[in-house]
Structures are given as structure tokens and as C-alpha cells.
Amino acid sequence: MPKDETLFKNLKEHSIAEFFRKNSQMLGYSGKIKSLTTVVHELMTNSLDACEESNILPDITVQVMQPEEGLVVIRSKDNGPGIPKQHISSVFGKMLAGTKFHRNIQLRGQQGIGVAGVTMFSQMTTGKPVEIISVTKHTAWDIELTIDVRKNTADISSQKELEPKPEVTGVEYFANFKDVQYSTGEQGPYEYLRRTALANPHAQITYIDPSGAKTIFERTSNAIPPKPIEVKPHPKGVSVDDLIIMSKTSKNRTIKGMLQDDFARMSPNKAKELSELVDFNIEKRPARLSWGEAEKIVKAFKKVKFLAPPTDCLRPIGQERIEAAMKSILAPEFLAVVERRPTVYGGGYAFLVEVGVAYGGHAGRRLSSGEMRSEIMRFANRAPLLFDTGGCGITKAVRDVDWKRYGLKNFDQLPVTVFVNLISTHIPYTGAGKQSISDSDDIQNEIRQALMDVCRKFNKFHSHRRKLAEHTARKNKLLKYVTEISNALSELLGKDEKEIRTYWENLVESAVGETIDDLESKVAEQEKEAEKNEGVLKETVEDENGKSSVVYDSDADESPPENGDGISRLSDYM
Amino acid sequence: MKTEAIVQKIIKLGEELEEQVEAGRSPEIVMPAKGLGNVSFNEEKKLLQLGEKTMSRNFLNIAHSRKFMQTVMIANLCRKLVESEKHASIREVYYQLKHTIEGAKENTFDGQEESDPIIEDLERSLNILREQMNLTADRRGYMYGNVKIVDAGDTINCAKLGRGGYGIPSTVEDIGFADIQADFALVIETAAMYERLIEEKFAKKNNALLIATQGQAARGVRRLIHRISKEQKLPVIVFTDGDPYGYYIYSVIKMGSINLAYLSESLGTPDCKFIGMTMTDIEHYGLEKVTEQLKDLDVKRIKEEMSYPWFKNKRWQTELKKMLKGGVRIEQQSLANKSLDFVAKKYLPEKIQTADFLP
């Protein structure tokens, strides 16, 4: 090997290790709580992807153990196809940074550094190898390895061949960590898995916490989500840098040809229109495109009208599946899910939002003090976003909704879970941490619209329920007075108390009972009407909102208020 | 009304309710409406009068049901009292009926302020006086002077009861007048002024009967004043603080009150006159330094009183306007600023002499 190349190779490997050490926060390993959640996330993503690619319904177990103070052991186990021995080293022991970069495809992964990052983080904090038990249909191995950071290869310290069990394939992974903190809060493993289960109804997820307590998030759908497809980038969503990279690798003979072939919605007519907007010939070789020229092209893109990008590449979870998952995990009293049609933000990126609101049951978050808090669950391409809540565009859109208008007063303190999943070929993260979505009117507006849709449904449910509760309260109130009245009347009239009481109780039953039936049929009718005419419903709902129920709050006390006559209040003087 | 008739009236109320319930109708108790809306001033009789409007207390109306229950309970208790010829104070009524409702965290009555108005409702509904249902209230108010009354068989000389005089019971129906040696009755707002006048021997020297109301006059006191005026034909003079509250005390003694408008004919004394304190007194007797500032609430009251039909005369309007303009009130006892006996020796005799009264 020539000397120069050796030098170059060392430099490159050195830079990967350095990159990870210096930039681990970019990969999610920052903060003790967040680091642990990132570990769980990477393992989870790896397992889900492995199962889905092999058309297996995922059944994944994650266990967190704390054998001693300051040490956390994570075990994860899936039912995927298993990894053949020759690939174990590269999956778990080689940093593959960049595989997911620059691909216009809807992926749940965030870092692209994958599960090798977990191995790296484990060895960085404990110096110990990780253990992988991989069972495929034909082979089974128990392997311990570390990463040789200088060569960026796996360093296998122990390997044992096991008896293969074709019927129970899968990967089991053990790793030790220090500098992490186990949290039971909103940003800990439990919450991460709960939310992952919500957004992946086809997965069965089991979680075992350090005390040994086991939680199973049941599978609620047997449909494996279809694989996302890669689409060509849309001219409105491309950066100068993207264009330069494309031009360096293009096999096209001209820039014009490259634009037509590699971009969506770029017809020969549009290419011609574009050529008239730049002051150089786009018939030259792509490789000769300069940075300045690329800037001019990107600028010209903004001036040309293109069709919106195709949206058939998006793979939502689906309204029914979200409903089933939320029902199973939150067991709410009320649940509504809305999936919006695909649309475009920033002119060039296809996206759609799925939104759900659950009320009551296990929805919301109960603090240790017993108080309730509402929770906002954010997802980007099904992956839960647990950090950077405040700065996230999703959070802002949720906060923008005037909840009290829909019967959700004091939104923050209600047993409410708001679910928002943003699906896109390109999620506009605010930073390298990829835990929040940047502000975008297009996206936030879609989220708001979807939430308002859901809220209108909630309002119907809520006012119906409130009326029923009022009826029951009214009936109970009357019945309790009946006891006193029949006692007094039986003395006054010298009649049997039971006989009198029966008459009065019947009176209450018939008077209030009828009203409840009336109400039920009235509500059913209203709902039919509403389905016929959504516009009218909206007005009714808004009307109802402003006023309190008029069913029987209206009967003011028969005596005018004492201080209304202006005289008896003179007693105030005394 | 005979005892038996009263019991029958109460039982009839219960029977009507029972009939309504058995017929499947929502039971209701009907009574004349109360409050300003159903009260008018009868120019001829010079009394507040209850109108024709009625209201109904409906059991199935959730806003009424609690009061409905309370009315039935009190009706039954009154029936028991009358039948057994026992008396109970309205506070005892409250305690007799107060308990936690079976199977609920709610009391039948949460205070006497809840049971008292129900008693008034029952009075209006049955057109029977509280006193006729053997209900009594606390004694309030005193009487002093050369008058002999018969109370429960005892003849009492109200001038021979030391410095306190006779405590007026809440029910004065059964009291008889054996002998009255007085030229007029002076009704006084504060007990302190009443005691001052006794000490100064005002009653003896002026041949007066003194009655202390101790603030707003209770039903018993008002009924007694009414009887002294109507039956004994004694002129009645009222002496209160010079403020809207004192003037309202006078107004109630004279015309009746809005709450008890249905009793005006037996409680009101339209012929009584007002002696003071007036705003004119302040200038006339040089009392500027012993006045007190009006409060916001006072100003509001004055404006209300100016609109009362019975205050719509020149003298009263002048006084009320002066009070508004000056922004001050004056107490009876401020007369002590001159000297302790000033009120007995100069103020009252002088005004009575010249008949310096407000209507």
C-alpha cells in the first residue's frame, strides 16, 4: 500500500472516532437521561426495521437493569430474521454514518449511525464489550465485541456457536452503560416505548423495568406497514449543496438532462423555462457545474411554477390503526383520530399529519402529587420525539388551539393525550438533535385544522356527557328530598310513610327518566343532522360553547334576590 | 282563628300535595309573590300592600326542590305545635328540623337564615300569622312608662320595673292594656338613648311612654306600636339617628316592610310622626362638629329613599337633599355634646312643644 493512502486511511478512521467522541450530542448521546433513551431508540429502530423488512410482525422486548449504582444494563430482544454471523460485526461493530443521509425517503431513523453507535457509547462509558445473540434459521451465535475505533472494525473478544432454532429467530443484545440515568418520567424508556407502541400498532412491545415489573403494549394491528419508497427530490426543496453533490455523481451528459431525470415535476418545458432564467448554458456536463452556477439554478427554481411533489410516497399509520392503538394503551373515555390529506410545505416537500385526542382513562399524565397533566405526544415518521418540547413546531400548533372553546378548559390539567404524527420524506428538524420540528405555517396549520376537527367531536361527546351527568344529579337530588318529604307528609296526614314515598319516587322516576330517553334520542338525531351538514354543526357547537346548558339551569329561584329590592339590604348596616 | 281551623288549613296543604302526586302531576305550593315586584303603596291607607301576583314552588324544579322540602317540614312542625298547644321560637324550629338528609351529605337546613324565610313563605301561603302557628322570636325592644299591661295573667306596671322597663315579647297578641297614663309614645332607635331618657325622668316629666326598638323594629315591637296607636289612640313619635338607616326604621314602623308587606295592616302605624334627628337640627343646634361622614352605601340608600312615595313630600325631600349635599349623618347620642340632659330637657320638649315633626 502506498504511503499516502495509508496516511489517508488512518486519518479517515481517526476522524470517525473523533467525530463520534466530539459530536456524540449530535447523535443523541447528550445528557444522562437522553443518552439512555437514545440507546433504546436505536435498538428499537434496528429491530423494527429488521422485522418489517422480513415481513415479520415485530415482537420486541426491552429490559432495563440496574445491577449497581451508576451502572445500567440494557437488554433488547426481537423476533426478526436474525443476523448471519458475517454481518454481525458490521451491524454492531462498524460505524456506518451517512447511510441515510441525502435520501428522499420517509424513514423513522434519526441518526443514521445506527446500533453501532450504541456499542460505541457502551464501550466509551464502561470499557466493556457488548453481547449479541443472533439466531437465524440456520445458525446461532453468541458473540461479544467492541469497536476498534482506529480501524473502525469490530473486535470480537468471544464467540460461541449455539444450537440454531429455526422457529425462534431473532437478535438479543446486551450492553452496559455508565454516565446515564434511568428515568421514569416523560423522557425515559417507558414513555419512549409507550409512544413507540402507539405509533407502531403492528408491534408487540414488552418492557421490563429495573424492579422487574413488566408492561406489555399489545399489538393492535396485524398489518405490517408498506415499505416507504424513495422519490426524486422536488426542485423547490433542494439546496445548493444537494445540487452540487447530485452533479458530481450524475451519469447524465448535460445539466439539463440531469435536472429532467433526477428531479420530480421537471418536464422538458420547465427545463427550458429554467434555462432562460440563468445566464449560462445548462447543456454542459454536470461535473462542471460550479457553486455559483448551482446557486443561480436554485434561485431560478424559486421563480418557476412547478406541480406539487407527488405525495403517494407517504406512508401514514392510518386512522383506524391509531385508534386501535390508543384505545388499547390509553383506554380513554373519548377518542378521535383524524388523518389529513397529503399536502406540501415550503413548496417542495410532501407531508401529512395524523392527529388523535384521547380523554379520560389512562390519557394524560398523573404526577406523583396525584394531579393530572395533559400530554402532547410528538412523532416524526412514527418515531417519538421526547426532547426539546418547547421549541417544537408541533407543540406550538397544539398550544395554538383554543381548547376551552371545545369544552376543554384548563387544558394543561386535564387527562388528555394529544397524538401528532408528522409524516414526510423530509422532516424539518430544528437541529442535529432531531428532537423537534421547526416552525412552518404549512405544517402547523395542518395540525391545527386536524386538532380542531377532533375537538369538534370532543365537544359533542362532552356536552352529551355533561347533560347525562346533570340528569343523574338532578334525579339523585330529588330522590334524597323525597325521604324527608314523605316522612313529614306521613306525619301530617297520618298515612303510611312507605305508601307516600312510593308515589313520590315514581313521580321522580317518570319525570326524570323520560327526559334522559328524550335526550338520548335527541343527541342521536343531532348527530345524524350533523353528518348531513358539517357546516351547520360547526355553528351549533360554537353556539353551545358560549352558553351553559339550558336544560334546567334556567329556572331561577322563584323569589327575587334579597338584595334586589334595595331595602332589606339595610341590614348590611347593622 | 280557632286552633282547629289552623290545623285543618295546614293539613289541607299536605293533602293537596298528595293529590297532585298521586295524579302524577308535579306538586306545587302556591303563595303570594314577595319582593318589590308585588308590593305597592296604598295611598288611601298609607301602607305598603301586597299585590295579586302569586308564585309557585314546584318540587320537580331543581331550583325549588330544596325549599319545597323545607316548606313541607316546617308545615308539619307547626301543625304539631298548634295541636299540642306548645310554643317554639323560630330558632328552636331550626334546631328541631335540622339534620343530615338520609344517605346524603346535605343538611335539611343550613342555618336559621334558611328556615326563617320559609316560615314567612308558609305564612303567606296559608294566610296564617306566624304567631297563630305558635312560633315566637327572641324578645327585642323595651317599654317604659306609666302603663299597666296584662301579660299571661300578671298585671305589670311598666314604670315600676327599675331602669330597664318591660321586655317586649315577639308575640303581643295576648297582651292587654289595663291602664295607660300617657299623652304620647316616643319610639327610640337606640337602647342607650332610651336609658338616658329614663335616667333624666323624661317619661315622668312629659307623661310619655318610651319604647326602644334596638335597631330595626322587630315584629312584636311593631305590632305593639300599632296597637298603642290604633287601640289606645296614643300619638306615636319616632326618634332615630339622622341617617338613611334610621329613616328606614321610621319608614318600616309607619308603612310596613317589603318582606312583610302582607302584614302591613297589622304591623304598620301610618299615623306616627318623625321628630329627629334631622339635618335641620344640625344647623339649628350647632351640631356640625359631631357629625360623621356618609359612606358610599349611605348615599345609595338616600337616593333610594328619596324615591319612596311616602317620602315624596317637601319636608322629607329637603332633609334627604341636605344630607346628600352635606355628606354627613348625625347620631341621637351626639346631642350629649351639649350636655347629657340636653336631649331630655331641651331638644325633645322644644320640638314637641312646637310640633316640629316630619310627616
Image (cartoon, coloured by chain):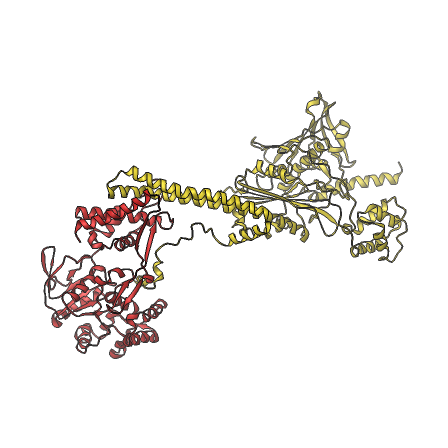
Relative horizontal placement of residue A452, taking residue B296 as reference (left or right): right
Q: Position of residue A315 (x, y in %)?
A: 70, 40
Q: Is residue A374 visible?
A: no
Q: Position of residue B265 (x, y in %)?
A: 22, 63
Q: Quadrant of residue B251?
A: bottom left
User: Which color was chain B given?
Assistant: red
User: Which color was chain A given?
Assistant: yellow
Name the one closer to the observer, A254 or A287. Answer: A254
Q: Quadrant of residue A479?
A: top left
User: Does residue A317 lie above or below A84 as drawn?
Assistant: below
Q: Quadrant of the N terminus of chain A?
A: top right
Please report the residue visible at 32 percent of the width from the left and 39 percent of the height from the top. A501
Q: Residue furthest front?
A: B23
Relative horizontal placement of residue A259, taking residue A403 as reference (left or right): right
Name the one closer to the observer, A163 or A403. Answer: A403
Q: Quadrant of the C terminus of chain A?
A: bottom left
Please report the residue visible at 18 percent of the width from the left and 57 percent of the height from the top. B171
Q: Position of residue A421 (x, y in %)?
A: 65, 43
